[in-house]
Image (cartoon, rainbow, N blue to C red):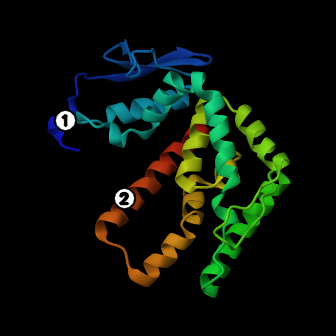
């Protein structure tokens, strides 16, 4: 992103203060606000410190593209409260076509890699009430209403920050099961990212990967790790 399009850093100091479940990030003593001018209040000090760390790391210009935690909490504060129903419905829709349910019939090596990587997590999902069917065809396989309701129930039980993160991770992975596993601390964000790329990595082995795409993938993996680390701060 060109520095000509970025706002200049307008503050000198970044601090946090608060107590209980209300923590603030202060720029030169003034409370940080969301792009929509809402006061940014966070439930824990460690999460406030993560946001503060992103603002402290800015140099001459403020680059939102390298501030994933700030961006996510902005969405959680500004948008999620009024869109919870939409986000829960989105999670359900993804569960209807979950990545780990669609297996390659061939070549054998890819089929085996998918089975080795995903069978464990499909079984994990089943143990948590989300028992998704597997297919080797391109046609959508109908998932049980019981499993889809379980996804809805899981999503509905999340607070706004966790729900925002959940739906974001689902979109990155293409998998409700992998995102659930991260939210439940059964998988790290990076491990889930790698599991979601079984076929992509196989294609890279065959045909290679250009430098620009490799950089995009590395940046997305790093961002996913940073966002998943939010869970340790809640």
Q: Quadrant of the C terminus?
A: top right
Assign a secondary structure to mark 1.
helix
Which residue is found at the position 67% from the left and 66% from the top?
A: 139
Q: Quadrant of residue 12?
A: top left
Horizontal side of 25 relative to 138 (left or right) equals left
Is 166 situated above or below 209?
Answer: above
Mark 1 = which residue?
5
Picture coordinates of residue 208, whole percent (x, y)? 38, 79
**What separation in Å lies between label 2 and label 1 (alpha carbons)?**
21 Å
Horizontal side of 214 relative to 94 (left or right) equals left
Is 200 situated above or below 70?
Answer: below
Picture coordinates of residue 1, whole percent (x, y)? 23, 44
Which residue is found at the position 48% from the left and 17% from the top?
A: 17
The answer to whether residue 137 of the structure is visible from this angle is yes
Assign a secondary structure to mark 2.
helix
**In contact (CB < 8 Å): disc 2 and disc 1:** no
Q: Which mark is residue 216?
A: 2
Horizontal side of 13 relative to 130 (left or right) equals left
**Front-lying residue, 49 or 176:** 176
Picture coordinates of residue 137, whole percent (x, y)? 67, 72
The answer to whether residue 234 of the structure is visible from this angle is no
Horizontal side of 136 relative to 196 (left or right) equals right
Picture coordinates of residue 90, whole percent (x, y)? 62, 41
Please rate how many residues cluster around mark 1, counting C-alpha atoms within 10 Å: few if below 14, some from 14 to 19, many from 20. Answer: few
């Amino acid at each position: 992103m060109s520095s000509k399009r970025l706002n200049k850093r307008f503050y000198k100091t970044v601090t946090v203060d608060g107590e209980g479940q209300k923590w603030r990030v202060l720029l030169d003593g003034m409370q940080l606000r969301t792009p929509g001018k809402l006061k940014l209040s966070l439930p824990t000090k460690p999460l406030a410190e993560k946001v503060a760390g992103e603002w402290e790391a800015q140099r001459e210009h403020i680059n939102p593209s390298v501030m994933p935690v700030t961006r996510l909490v902005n969405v959680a504060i500004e948008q999620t409260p009024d869109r919870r129903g939409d986000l829960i419905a989105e999670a359900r829709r993804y569960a209807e076509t979950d990545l780990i349910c669609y297996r390659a019939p061939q070549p054998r090596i890819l089929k085996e890699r998918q089975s080795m990587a995903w069978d464990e997590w499909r079984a994990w999902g089943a143990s948590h009430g989300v028992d998704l069917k597997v297919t080797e065809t391109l046609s959508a396989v109908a998932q049980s209403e019981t499993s889809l309701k379980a996804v809805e129930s899981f999503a509905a039980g999340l607070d706004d920050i966790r729900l925002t993160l959940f739906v974001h991770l689902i979109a990155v992975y293409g998998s409700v099961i992998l995102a659930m596993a991260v939210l439940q601390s059964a998988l790290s964000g990076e491990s889930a990212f790698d599991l979601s790329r079984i076929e992509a990595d196989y294609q890279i082995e065959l045909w290679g990967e250009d430098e620009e795409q490799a950089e995009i993938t590395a940046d997305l993996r790093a961002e996913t790790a940073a966002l998943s680390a939010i869970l340790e701060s809640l």
